[in-house]
Image (cartoon, rainbow, N blue to C red):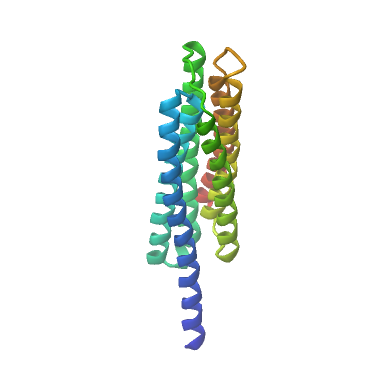
Amino acid sequence: MCYNVKKQKDGDRLKNVRLSAALTGLLLNFILFLTKLYIGVSSASLTVYCDAVNNLGDTFACAVAIFGFVMIKRLGEKQSDRAQSLCTFVISLLIAATGIYFVYNGLERMMYPVPVQYSALYLAVISATVLVKLLMGIMYKVFDKKAPSTVLKALVLDSFLDCFITLSAVMSLVLVTKINYAVDGLFAIITGSAITVSAIKNIVSETKFLINN
């Protein structure tokens, strides 16, 4: 009896840890989305704008994770692996869609270049968001060690990929002042291709799991 009570308490603790991670991620990603959206629209930088859309996608991904963790509480541990795999699959679809969106807009920008307004303040703010995403990745990693979850692992990977995306936005803002070309469009294509390939790998992996279980 005591063993069952302890097991249930441990299970509830793990579920609460996962839920806390997803809720924190949702809040931070939405703040990053609003910040980058303002800078992207104000500066006409495609890479910063796409980075903002990426953070919006991450916000939805966290919302999916929250829904999944709540459902796991109701379904019980027997269905836990399948529910988490389904959430990871949906999150990967969102990431892939974002990557394709990047590539499309990058190609469009290269065909129809638009002047980008450089600002040292904007550059500093965007650079700071790289650190925020890095810390979020570490946070998810810590939470995943406390309560292992394929969903949290997907959010860890996504956060570290986002650091690369935002660094590309920073490089684009710097290079746009030196190169008279639609460099932000090129960076959007490169980053979009990278995250799409990564997301497709996850989609294939989770599809195999869902089919076989």
Q: Residue at x 54, y 51 (%)?
A: 136
Q: Residue furthest bottom?
A: 1
Compared across the picture, whether 47 is left or right of 42 comes to right
Question: Is residue 157 placed above or below 108 in the rendered structure?
Answer: below
Quarter location, residue 83: bottom left
The image position of residue 141, as x and y in percent, is: 59, 56
Q: Residue furthest front?
A: 120
Q: Residue at x 46, y 43 (%)?
A: 58
As rendered, which of 200 and 121 lies closer to the eye? Answer: 121
- Badge count: 0
The image position of residue 160, as x and y in percent, is: 60, 44
Question: Is residue 18 placed above or below 189 in the rendered structure?
Answer: below
Q: Is residue 71 visible?
A: yes
Compared across the picture, whether 10 is left or right of 194 comes to left
Compared across the picture, whether 101 is left or right of 146 comes to left
The image position of residue 29, as x and y in percent, is: 45, 46
Q: Residue at x 58, y 31 (%)?
A: 170
Question: Is residue 63 placed above or below 102 in the rendered structure?
Answer: below
Q: Is residue 213 visible?
A: no
The image position of residue 120, as x and y in percent, is: 54, 30
Q: Residue at x 39, y 61 (%)?
A: 70
